[in-house]
Each structure stands twice: as C-alpha cells, then as structure tokens.
Image (spheres, rainbow, N blue to C red):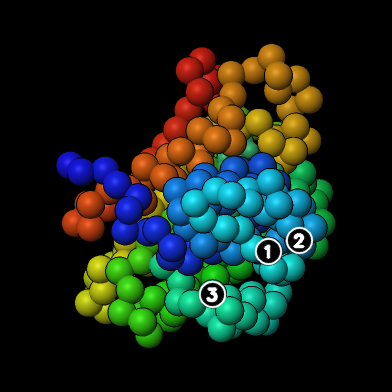
Amino acid sequence: MVISMERWHGKVAVVTGASAGIGASIAEHLVKHGMKVVGLARRVELIEENAKKLIGEKGELHGIKTDMTKPEEITNAFKMIEDQYGPIHVLVNNAGTIEFTSLSDGEVEDWKKTFDLNVIGLCVATRDAVRSMKNSNIDGHIIHINSISGHYPVQCAGVNVYSATKYAVTALTNDLRVELVEAGTKIKVTSISPDLTVTDLARRFHTDIDNMAALKAEDIAEACVYVLSTPPHVQVHEMMIRPVGSRF
Ligand SMILES: NC(=O)c1ccc[n+]([C@@H]2O[C@H](COP(=O)([O-])OP(=O)(O)OC[C@H]3O[C@@H](n4cnc5c(N)ncnc54)[C@H](OP(=O)(O)O)[C@@H]3O)[C@@H](O)[C@H]2O)c1
C-alpha cells in the first residue's frame, strides 16, 4: 500500500474546534503536509495566532469564528470557505465537549449543549462538506473524532451524556458510509476514537493527568495524516488509539 499525502497538496481541509487541543494539532499537521486549512471555533484569535507560527510551511491556516452549536453559523462558514478558498476536500469533525453532569440530577441545558455540539454540529458540517464535495465531483474524506466512550461505557463519573453522543458518532459513521456508497460517491469516512489525551478538556476531569497513561494531541493528528494518506481504494473505517497502560 502506497502511503502519500500528495493528492491533498493545495486542497482545502476544514477542521472544527481548531483553536485548541487535538483540533489545533490536526490543523498544524495538515498545514505541514501542504493543505489549505480552515479552522472553525469560537476563539478564532487562537487559530490566527497559530496561523502566524505556520507561515513558511507548505500549506496555510485560516480561521473563521463559528459557534458549532448554531447550524446557520456553520452553513455560513462553509459558504465563506467555498467562496474564498474553493471546494472542500477534507472535513475533520473534531469540535466536542464534555459537560460534567448527572443523569439523576442534571440540567437539560447541559445535555442539550453536548448533543448540539457533538452530534448536530457534526451532522450539519458533514452535510455541508458532502454537498461541496458532490458539487465539485471530489472524492473527499470526512473524519469524525470519536472516543473510546463511543464504543463501550467508560468508567468515568459524569461522562454519561457525552458517551451517548459518541455512541451516536459511531452509528453516524456507518450510516454516512452507506449513504455515500448508495449515492455513487467515492467519498471516504473514518472514525478515530482516542483514549485519554492531554488537552484542556481532559484536564478538567483528570487533574492528575500528568501521572496517568495518556496520549498527546499530536498522536491523534498523526493518525489523521495516516488515514488521509491511504490509497483511494482503502478506507480506514475505525481507528481506536490507546496509550500503553490505559486504565479505561
Ligand atoms: N482529550 C481527550 O481525552 C479526548 C479523548 C477522546 C476523544 N476526544 C475528542 O476529541 C475532540 C477534541 O477534544 P479536545 O480534548 O481537544 O478538547 P479541547 O482541548 O477542549 O478543545 C475543544 C475544541 O472544540 C472547540 N469547541 C468547543 N465548543 C465549541 C463550539 N460551541 N463551537 C465551536 N467550537 C467549539 C473549542 O474551540 P472554542 O472553545 O474556541 O470554540 C476547541 O477548539 C472532541 O470531540 C473530544 O470528544 C478527546
């Protein structure tokens, strides 16, 4: 199998939640592999700071301020991307949140916020990216940043509704794959499911994370590069990544 990022050189990749953590690292890696990356997040100033650090690399990074819980903002951002940078070849659905909540005593607002971002935002971005790919006849690639929590119940208090959203991502990955085949496209879809990864999100739950077995954001970014590098006929459907010594 010939592994190469060459076919993506100069092409547009959208990374949601590119202002921090795993998304920031994915954006950086894709720029270094020559892609024109547009990052979507509320803290667009963080993406712009990273863009300055990446000047001189093979690709480029741009940011568009977008609240991924607001469908109309997502669709406007995708329109701007097509107008300014061209049709979309790669979408990485990375933006996600964990609201620490309880099933027996939690707030509906926290549950809705988690579903709005982790599930509905992902669906809207996917729809808009697939429309762009189909309109321009592009054999693109959609990557969902899922979680081990999307495959079995992880023993971690408070991540109940989060797990439900990630189980939804597991189902949506296969649903999308089948839809894309039935539509006669060669667009790929991949779910990447990390175990504990050192980011701001994980630190909120594990204050002792520096003493735990954990992945780095760049481990997930490198996995993204790998799945994108596979030949056109090869589709990595699911990639679960654990740190050696994981307790989950
Ligand atoms: N860290 C882990 O242990 C771990 C493990 C498995 C899976 N994951 C998954 O990996 C993905 C990234 O998580 P992370 O750990 O890198 O988290 P993080 O460091 O908290 O970063 C989250 C990113 O999502 C963006 N985001 C949050 N709410 C948003 C909103 N309403 N609109 C737009 N963007 C929003 C944030 O940007 P703004 O705040 O600037 O909007 C930020 O860029 C998530 O899907 C998460 O479920 C993480």
How far is disc 3 from disc 2 in space, using C-alphas? 17 Å
Q: Quadrant of the N terminus?
A: top left
**Within-10-Å neighbours for mark 1: few <14, some 14–19, many 20+:** many
Answer left or right for 133 relative to 168: left
Answer left or right for 171 relative to 230: right
Q: Which residue is mark 1?
A: 63
Mark 3 and mark 2 lie on one chain; the one further toward the N terminus is 2
Q: Which mark is residue 44?
A: 2
User: Relative to 198, is 94 above or below?
Assistant: below
Q: Look at label 3 and name its amino acid.
A: Tyr
Q: Quadrant of the C terminus?
A: top right
Image location of residue 118, percent across then percent down: 61, 58
Residue 164 visible in image: no
How far is disc 1 from disc 2 in space, using C-alphas? 6 Å
Q: Which mark is residue 85?
A: 3
| Callout 1 touching callout 2 (CB < 8 Å) | yes
Q: Which mark is residue 18?
A: none
Tell me which residue sits at (26%, 74%) in the image.
Answer: 185
Image location of residue 10, percent across then percent down: 43, 63
In-front residue for pair 72/103: 72
Tell me which residue sits at (50%, 46%) in the image.
Answer: 32
Q: Look at label 2 and name its amino acid.
A: Val
Mark 1 and mark 3 lie on one chain; the one further toward the N terminus is 1
**Within-10-Å neighbours for mark 2: few <14, some 14–19, many 20+:** some
Secondary structure under the numbered disc 3 in the rendered image? helix
Residue 39 visible in image: yes
| Callout 1 touching callout 3 (CB < 8 Å) | no
Say if disc 2 is inside 8 Å of ligand 1.
yes
Image location of residue 86, percent across then percent down: 49, 77
In-front residue for pair 128/195: 128
Q: Quadrant of residue 116?
A: bottom right
